[in-house]
Image (cartoon, helix red, strand yellow):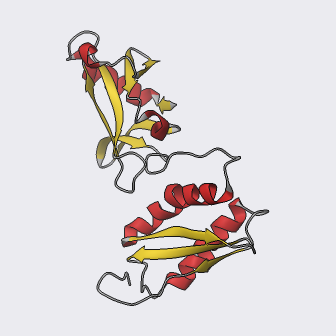
Amino acid sequence: MISISETAETHFGKLLENQDANTSIRVFVVNPGTPSAECGVSYCPADAVEDSDTVLEFNGFNAVIDLESAPFLEEAEIDFVTDQMGSQLTLKAPNAKARKVDSDAPLAERVSYMIEAEINPQLASHGGKVMLVEITKEKVAVLQFAGGCNGCSQVDLTLKDGIEKQMLEQFADELTGVKDATEHEAGEHSYY
């Protein structure tokens, strides 16, 4: 479910040395499955572990995950990196904003998941996002842009060279193209 690097295990071990015995770490997602999902790590005293929690054993400590957060922490990675800027704990949870779907799920679900997990995080740096409107009989994914993407002068480039290329590569036998259904109106929100 969650992988924790050796450097992060060492870091957690040092932090937990100063806590009460049997204290674990709790890994969680606030607002899981939504665009505002945030991941976190905190101390978890032994008396705060619920029967429904998942407890994972690591080198010298346990990680506790609540029932609601668990599916959104699939494939999550925790690392502790040191560079010229200092040391930092990183938690990457690609499924936090959208629950991972099975490979045999309907195409629309898999495309929507790909948008939430891969495309929208890239667009977020410009204040933009995109959502799936429909998949036509001709196997064309119809998308709606929002936020900074609505009215952006680069939206055609983003659609054709970015999103369409990614989607056709990932869904080669299932999609034939991508179309923008947005009525783009430039405004203060548009990214330039």
Q: Residue furthest top?
A: 21
- Answer left or right for 80 relative to 155: left
Across and down, in percent, residue 146 comes to 42, 75
**Tally of numbered tags:** 0
Q: Residue furthest right?
A: 173
What's the residue at 60%, 55% (across, down)?
109
What's the residue at 69%, 59% (across, down)?
170
Across and down, in percent, residue 29 comes to 36, 40
> Taking 80 as reference, is 177 above or below it?
below
> Taking 189 as reference, is 87 above or below it?
above
- Which residue is at the front of the view, 4 or 2? 2
Across and down, in percent, residue 50 comes to 33, 19
Across and down, in percent, residue 7 comes to 41, 29
| Quarter location, residue 52 | top left
What's the residue at 39%, 30% (across, down)?
8
Quadrant in which the C terminus is drawn: bottom left
What's the residue at 50%, 58% (across, down)?
116
- Answer left or right for 114 relative to 174: left
| Quarter location, residue 150 | bottom left
> Taking 173 as reference, is 18 above or below it?
above
